[in-house]
Image: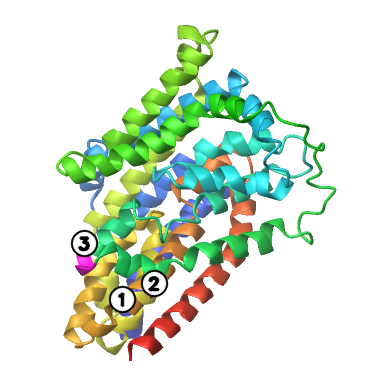
Amino acid sequence: MESLLLKLAPFLKILFAFAIMLAGMRLKVGLGLSILTGGIILGLTFGMAPMPIALTGAAALGQKSFLFLAAIVGLILVLSDAMERSGQSARLMEALSGYLTSPRLRLVFFPALIGLLPMPGGAVFSAPMIKTVSESMSITNSDRAVLNYWFRHIWELCWPLYPGIILTVALADITLIELISKTWPGTPVMLLTGWFFFLRPGVLGAGDIAVAVPQAGPGKRAALRQGLPLLIAICGAIGLESAIAALTPNIAFEWGVLAALAAAVTCVMVQNTQLGLPFLKQVLAKKSLWSMLFVIVAVFIFKDIMQVCGVVEEMSRAAGGGAALIASATFLPFLVGMVAGINVAFVGATFPLLLGVLNTLGMQDQTIPYLVLASFCGFTGVMISPIHICFVLTCQYFNCDLAGTWRKVVWPSIAFLLSGGGVFWVLLTLSV
């Protein structure tokens, strides 16, 4: 009994920290403060003293990844606010209304489009578009948040520009095609589960999403003009990311995203000269901007405390022996994904362990099936994580109850996880 408790100790500590975070969110003490408190408790339970925790937090805020993310989210909010305040979002909806005749397609299109832009916190980019396109629909803010969050992430397992995929192929020493050709079912599964749980007629009736019959829109040229900032942001980020990776790999790809977003903001300001400098001052003074940035601060501090206090290493030791392979391919990626809320975290923290176990057991020929299983499990953890930055920022934007909205994501995430088990079984059968 005592040895069992010792093995379970790391997992119990993590669950305790998670419970504290969820309780704080439920009691509305603030998302950022709840996550920050959970991180401090996690560090204390894993043996860190207060001073190392404080130093770890300070170091986290000096990292390039944090500074890039803060800048990216800040520019996203400026761009979104500029398009909304100038009426350009509404004009874009009007221009596209003749092409997006299905109300359900309208709810899916913009999150899926922005999903092609691999930027952290990108769901806050499409949130204003969901708000605009659903203004005349009888749906709750919680439903808007879920739709925006879910369909923003449909490409995560197959779009080659996502850092998690790039890191996976680098660790496993395989090609992008080898991996993506096996993980691609994740996208249609995300679409199908999203439709079944959030969009099918039994969930959203025709009366709930009824909109005026679209008239003939202003035309393609008007749609292109109103959507130009979005095209600059998406195409520019993807193009610059690819160019940086190919030509100057020593330069961080985030510079490409920042340059594209800055160009998109400039485009909006030029197209809407009435905004001017006072608008930028008002945006920078908004409480919502700084509260979102504080959430990012809390997430990064939490992530670094988790790394420094050796959470993953303790979980790995606890799952040793014959259970190591199953644990490293399923439970550990899921748990790390849920705790960290980002794909790179579960890939970087658990895939080296999984690859090492496969090599030890002489199962190198089954590497890809197990990587696919771990990817589905880890991504399910990320999607179900209440501290996923996209989920947190989306709920913050729509001002909806985080716990109630989170419950809506649980069952579709479980369905997605089960589909990953099916894909793994097929790949394993074919590899034998």
Tell me the SS state at disc 2: helix
Q: Nearer the viewer, residue 324 or 5?
A: 324
Q: Quadrant of the N terminus?
A: bottom left
Disc with the residue nearer the chain's start (3 vs 1) = 3
Disc with the residue nearer the chain's start (2 vs 3) = 3
Disc with the residue nearer the chain's start (2 vs 1) = 2
Q: Which residue is mark 3?
A: 170
Q: Nearer the viewer, residue 217 or 326?
A: 217
Q: Which residue is mark 1?
A: 368
The residue sitting at 49% across, 58% down in the picture is 383
Question: Mark 2 and 1 residues: CB-CB less than 8 Å, in contact?
Answer: yes
Q: Quadrant of the C terminus?
A: bottom left
Numbered badge on residue 271 = none
Q: Which residues are magenta?
A: 170-174
Q: Could you say where residue 340 lies in the image, as x and y percent from the top left?
A: 37, 55
Tell me the SS state at disc 1: helix
Q: Which residue is mark 2?
A: 182
